[in-house]
C-alpha cells in the first residue's frame, strides 16, 4: 500500500478511544457544572424577586390599612391601639419589620421588631428616596454578607405626611440548602452513576477488543498458538467474564476458531509436504536406480522392457499425485454450459458395477436404496458429481472391514435438493475429527498406513460447493460406522 493509501485508511487505537472517552466525560462534567450554575443563578434571581414582591405588597397593605383605620376611628387613642394590633397581627408578622414613619424617618408605629442596626437611618434614607422620586413605591436591595441580604420597601401614605416602610431580611443560604437537597444532589448522584456505568460499559467493550487486537497481532507475526483470553469467549455469569455484547463474545470465539483452523492447516501442510516429498522421492529413487542400472549394464538389454514397465508405473504414481493436487484447486468452479440432468439411480448402479472387483476383494455387501416414488433425476456437471459418489464410496470401501456392508441410499428430496447417504460398517470417525476430514491433506490416521494424499473428501466438498450443495459426516445408526450425508441439485423447473 502506498503512502497516499496509508493516510486514507487510518485507524483509531484503543488508547485514543480511552482518551476520547475521558475527554467526553470531562466535557460533560464541565457543561453540567455550567448549567447548574446558570440554573442556580436564575432561580436565585427569581427567589429574590418573589421576596421583593412580597415586601412591596406588605408595604402597600400597611399604608392602605392605616388609612382605613384612620377613616374609621376619630379618637387618636383608638387609632393607635388598632394600628398597633394590626401591625402585630399574622397578616404582616411574616413579612418582616413594618414601620409607619414621618417625613424625618422617625418611627410612629411598628410591629415591635427592632432587630436592625440604625433602623432610623434606614427609614429616613428610604423616605428621602420616596420624596425624591415624587412619591410611589421605592425598593432597595442591600447585600449585607455573602449569604445575608436585606430588602427595604417604602411608599407614602396618601394625605397623611406619613410613610410605610417594610424591612425584610432573607438568608440566601436557606435557599441554597433547599436547592442542593432537592435539585443539585439528586442530579449530581445521577450524573456520577451514569458516568460510572458509561466507564464500566466502555471498559467491558475495550478489554475484549484489546485482547482480540493483541491476539491478531501475534498471529500476524506468525505465532499460531496465540488465542483470545478464554473469559471473553464464554458466556459466563462472573463479572470477569462479561462483555457488553454477545457479538464480541461471538467474535472472540470465531477468531479463536479461525486461528485453530489456520494452525491445523499449517500442521497438515507440513505433514502433506513431508508426505508428498516421500511419495515423490520413493518412485524417483526407483526410477533413478533402474536407469542407472540400465546405463552401467547391470540390467542386460533383454530385461529393458520389464524395467521400463516398472519405470512407467512409478511415473504414473507421480502423475496421479500431481493430477490430484491440480484438481483440488479447480473443482469448485463449475462451467454452466456443462450442467445437465441425469438419472441418479443409473449413476449409482454404474458405480457399483465399476467397483464390483474392489467390493468382491473384501467380500463387502453393497446395498442400494433409491426412493423411486419421486423423480430420480438430478442436475449438474455429471462427471464431477459422479466423481463425488466415486470418492465417497471408495472411501467407505477402504475403511469397511472384510465381510462388512455399505448402504447407498437416497430417501427424499428436500428444498429442491436430492438427499444422498453413504454409510458403512467400518470404525467410523471420532466426533472431534468429523469436520476436519473435509480439509485438504487431512488424514484421520496421521501415520502413513493410509493410502492416498488426503484430498478425496476435500475434492468432494469443493465439487459440491461449486454446485451450491453441502456435505457432512456423522455416525450410522444402522451399521455403526461413518455416515456421509450430502445433496445433489434437482433439475430446474420449466417455466
Image (cartoon, rainbow, N blue to C red):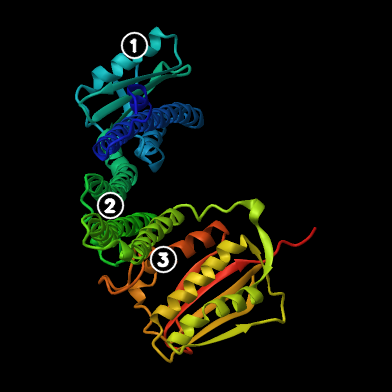
Give 279 or 173, whichever is nearer the viewer. Answer: 279
- 442 sits left or right of 371 in the view: left
User: Residue 489, image x and y in percent?
Assistant: 63, 65
The residue under label 2 is 208
First reached walking from the N terminus: tag 3 or tag 2: 2
Number of residue marks: 3
The residue under label 1 is 128
Instruction: Tell which tag, 1 or 3, sits nearer the viewer.
Output: 3
Disc 3 from disc 2: Cα separation: 32 Å
Disc 1 from disc 2: Cα separation: 77 Å
First reached walking from the N terminus: tag 1 or tag 2: 1
Q: Which quadrant of the structure image shows residue 452?
A: bottom left
Residue 470 sits above or below residue 327 on the image = below
Q: Which element carries disc 1, helix, strand or loop?
A: helix
The residue at the point 29 percent across, 15 percent down is: 124
User: Residue 10, image x and y in percent?
Assistant: 34, 30
The residue at the point 29 percent across, 14 percent down is: 125
Q: Which element carries disc 3, helix, strand or loop?
A: helix
Disc 1 from disc 3: Cα separation: 107 Å
Q: Quadrant of the C terminus?
A: bottom right
For the residue carrying disc 1, how many other residues have a C-alpha within 10 Å: few (<14), some (14-19), or many (20+)?
some
Instruction: Tell which tag, 1 or 2, sits nearer the viewer.
Output: 2
Q: Is residue 99 visible?
A: no
User: Residue 389, image x and y in percent?
Assistant: 53, 71
The residue under label 3 is 438
Q: In which quarter of the image is the N terminus?
A: top left
Residue 180 sits above or below residue 323 on the image = above
First reached walking from the N terminus: tag 1 or tag 3: 1
- 238 sits left or right of 321 in the view: left
Q: Which element carries disc 2, helix, strand or loop?
A: helix
Is mark 3 in CB contact (under 8 Å) with mark 2? no
Instruction: Tell which tag, 3 or 2, sits nearer the viewer.
Output: 3
Amino acid at each position: 500500500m502506498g503512502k497516499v493509501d496509508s493516510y486514507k485508511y487510518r485507524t483509531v487505537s484503543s488508547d485514543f478511544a480511552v482518551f476520547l472517552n475521558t475527554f467526553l466525560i470531562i466535557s460533560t462534567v464541565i457543561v453540567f457544572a455550567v448549567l447548574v450554575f446558570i440554573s442556580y443563578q436564575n432561580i436565585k434571581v427569581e427567589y429574590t424577586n418573589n421576596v421583593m414582591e412580597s415586601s412591596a405588597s406588605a408595604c402597600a397593605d400597611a399604608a392602605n390599612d392605616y388609612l382605613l383605620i384612620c377613616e374609621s376611628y376619630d379618637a387618636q387613642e383608638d387609632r393607635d391601639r388598632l394600628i398597633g394590633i394590626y401591625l402585630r397581627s399574622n397578616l404582616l408578622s411574616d413579612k418582616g419589620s413594618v414601620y409607619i414613619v414621618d417625613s424625618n424617618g422617625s418611627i410612629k408605629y411598628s410591629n415591635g421588631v427592632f432587630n436592625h442596626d440604625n433602623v432610623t437611618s434606614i427609614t429616613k434614607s428610604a423616605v428621602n428616596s420616596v420624596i425624591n422620586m415624587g412619591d410611589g413605591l421605592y425598593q432597595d436591595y442591600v447585600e449585607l454578607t455573602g449569604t445575608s441580604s436585606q430588602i427595604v420597601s417604602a411608599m407614602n401614605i396618601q394625605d397623611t405626611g406619613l410613610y410605610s416602610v417594610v424591612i425584610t431580611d432573607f438568608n440566601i443560604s436557606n435557599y441554597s440548602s433547599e436547592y442542593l437537597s432537592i435539585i443539585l444532589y439528586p442530579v449530581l448522584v445521577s450524573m456520577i452513576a451514569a458516568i460510572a456505568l458509561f466507564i464500566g460499559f466502555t471498559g467491558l467493550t475495550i478489554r475484549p477488543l484489546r485482547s482480540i487486537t493483541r491476539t491478531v497481532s501475534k498471529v500476524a507475526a506468525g505465532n499460531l498458538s496465540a488465542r483470545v483470553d478464554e473469559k471473553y469467549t464464554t458466556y459466563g455469569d462472573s463479572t470477569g467474564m462479561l462483555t457488553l455484547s454477545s457479538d464480541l463474545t461471538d467474535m472472540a470465539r470465531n477468531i479463536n476458531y479461525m486461528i485453530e483452523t489456520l494452525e491445523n492447516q499449517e500442521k497438515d501442510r507440513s505433514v502433506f509436504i513431508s508426505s508428498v516429498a516421500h511419495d515423490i522421492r520413493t518412485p524417483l529413487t526407483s526410477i533413478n536406480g533402474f536407469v542407472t542400472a540400465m546405463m552401467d549394464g547391470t540390467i542386460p538389454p533383454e530385461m529393458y522392457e520389464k524395467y521400463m514397465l516398472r519405470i512407467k508405473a512409478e511415473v504414473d504414481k507421480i502423475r496421479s499425485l500431481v493430477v490430484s493436487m491440480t484438481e483440488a484447486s479447480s473443482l469448485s468452479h463449475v462451467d454452466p454450459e456443462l450442467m445437465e440432468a441425469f438419472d441418479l439411480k443409473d449413476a449409482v448402479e454404474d458405480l457399483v458395477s465399476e467397483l464390483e472387483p474392489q467390493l468382491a476383494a473384501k467380500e463387502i455387501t453393497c446395498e442400494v436404496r433409491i426412493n423411486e416414488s419421486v423423480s430420480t433425476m438430478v442436475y449438474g456437471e455429471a462427471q464431477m458429481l459422479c466423481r463425488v459418489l466415486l470418492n465417497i464410496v471408495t472411501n467407505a470401501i477402504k475403511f469397511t472391514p472384510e465381510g462388512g456392508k455399505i448402504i447407498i441410499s437416497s430417501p427424499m428430496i428436500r428444498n429442491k435438493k436430492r438427499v444422498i447417504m453413504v454409510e458403512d460398517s467400518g470404525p467410523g470417525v471420532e466426533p472431534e475429527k468429523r469436520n476436519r476430514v473435509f480439509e485438504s491433506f487431512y488424514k484421520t490416521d496421521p501415520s502413513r498406513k493410509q493410502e492416498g494424499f488426503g484430498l478425496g473428501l476435500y475434492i468432494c466438498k469443493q465439487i459440491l460447493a461449486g454446485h451450491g450443495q453441502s456435505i457432512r459426516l456423522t455416525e450410522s445408526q444402522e451399521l455403526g460406522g461413518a455416515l456421509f450425508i450430502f445433496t445433489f441439485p434437482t433439475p430446474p423447473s420449466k417455466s
